[in-house]
Amino acid sequence: MKPLISIIIPTFNRASLIGETLDSVLAQTYQNWECIVVDDGSTDNTKEVIENYTKKDARFQYHKRPNNLPKGANACRNYGFSLSNGELIQWFDSDDLMHPDLLQNKVAIFNTNPEIEFVVCGITTIDANEQTKVFNISMVDNYLEGYLNDILILNTFNILWKRTAVTSHDWDVSIHKYQDLDFIFRVLYKNTLKGEHVDKSLITVKVHGNSISKTNSKKHNTSRLKVRERMYLLSKETMSAKMQLRLYHLYLFEFRNILSLGDYKLCFNEVQGKVIKGFDVKLNLLMYIFLHMLAKRGMVRLTNYLIKIST
C-alpha cells in the first residue's frame, strides 16, 4: 500500500532556513505525499521561497493563515490539517530536515499491521557549535510513559500519525509553549493507540538561538503551567497512581522554575488554583514566594521541599 502522506509545516520568517527543509521533503524516496506550508504572517521573503517550490512541484502548497485565526504555530497546524487529504499525517517544523528514507521506513511499518496508529523514529540534534547528539527510540511497553519518564523523545517532527488517531484532537491555540507536549499527551494519555518505532535517527533538528523554545515571556510561563496542570488532571482519569505522582512532581517543578524567573503573580494564582492541595502545602509555597520576592532566596530549600511532597 502507498497511502498519501500530508506533511504540514507552519512557518514564520524562515526564508533563510525553509528551503533546506523543503529540499529534504523533495528528496524523499517515498513519493506519495503532499506538503502544506502555512505562513503565520512572515515579513521576510518566505512566501517567495516557498512559491519557487510550488512552481516546480505541485505536491507543495503555500497558504497564509486566515486573518480570523489567532497568530501562532498551533493555529497554522490546525488550518493545515483542515486542508489536508492524507491518510497519514506528518507535522513538521520549518527548520528541521528529513532523512531521505524517513517516510519510506515509516510507511513500511504501517503496512505490516493495520492496527498501528502512529510510528516514531529517533532524531539527531545539531547545536550552534555543530555538536551532534543522536537520540534513538528504544523498545517500550508504553510510549507515553516512556516519554514522561525521559526514556524517549517524542515531538511534532518524529511522529507519523494515522489520520484517524488525531482527527478529534486540535492543537490548542491558547498554548504558546510546550505545544508538542500538550498535543502528544492528549492524544496518547488513554493508552488506547497502538504505536511502533524505527530504531534509528531519521530526522535532523537544528538547535539555534531564535527558536521559540529558547524564549521566555509571561504568556509562555502561563502556557507551561497550563500544560502541566492539564496533564496532571487528565492523568487522574486513566493513569496509574505512580504516573499521577510523576505528573504532580513535574507540575510542582514547573511552578518552581517559574518562581525562579520572578513571575510572582502567576505563582500566587497557582497556589489558589485546583492542583495544589492541602492548607500546609499552600502556606509553605506562599512563604517561598514571599521569600524569593523579597530576598531572591529559598530555591534550594523549595526544591528539597517539593521533592519531599511529590516523590
Image: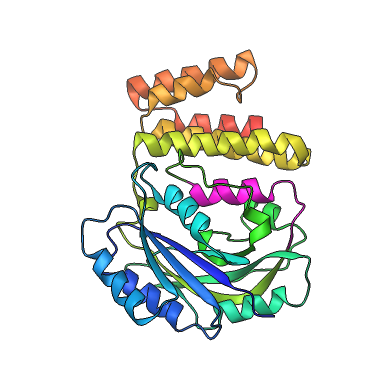
Q: Residue 17: where, in percent of width, then height?
A: 31, 69
Answer yes or no: is residue 305 visible: yes
Q: Quadrant of the C terminus?
A: top right
Q: Position of residue 300 (x, y in %)?
A: 48, 34
- When asked about the image quadrant of residue 233, the answer is top right
Numbered range of the magenta stretch? 178-194
Residue at image coords 55%, 49%: 181
Q: Which colour style is shown?
A: rainbow
Q: Position of residue 13 (x, y in %)?
A: 27, 59
Asked whether 270 or 190 is in front, the reply is: 190
| 3 over 245 or under it: above or below | below
Query: Does residue 15 sit above or below 282 in this rendering?
Result: below
Looking at the figure, which quarter contains the N terminus? bottom right
* Count of numbered badges drawn on the protein: 0
* Residue at image coords 54%, 39%: 227
Location of residue 195 in the rendering, given as x and y in whole percent from the top left corner: 72, 63
The answer, for residue 129, to whether it is visible in the render is: no
Q: Is residue 191 magenta?
A: yes
Q: Vertical placement of 122 versus 146: above or below?
A: below
Front residue of 137 and 12: 12
Task: Answer whether residue 220 is magenta in the image.
Answer: no
> Is 87 left or right of 258, judged from the image as shown?
right
Between 92 and 181, the residue placed more toward the observer is: 92
The residue sitting at the bottom extreme is 29
The foreground one among 115 and 236 is 115
Please give the name of the residue rendered at 51% of the width and 54% of the height, measured from the top-left corner.
82
Residue drawn at x 33%, y 69% as measured from the top left: 18
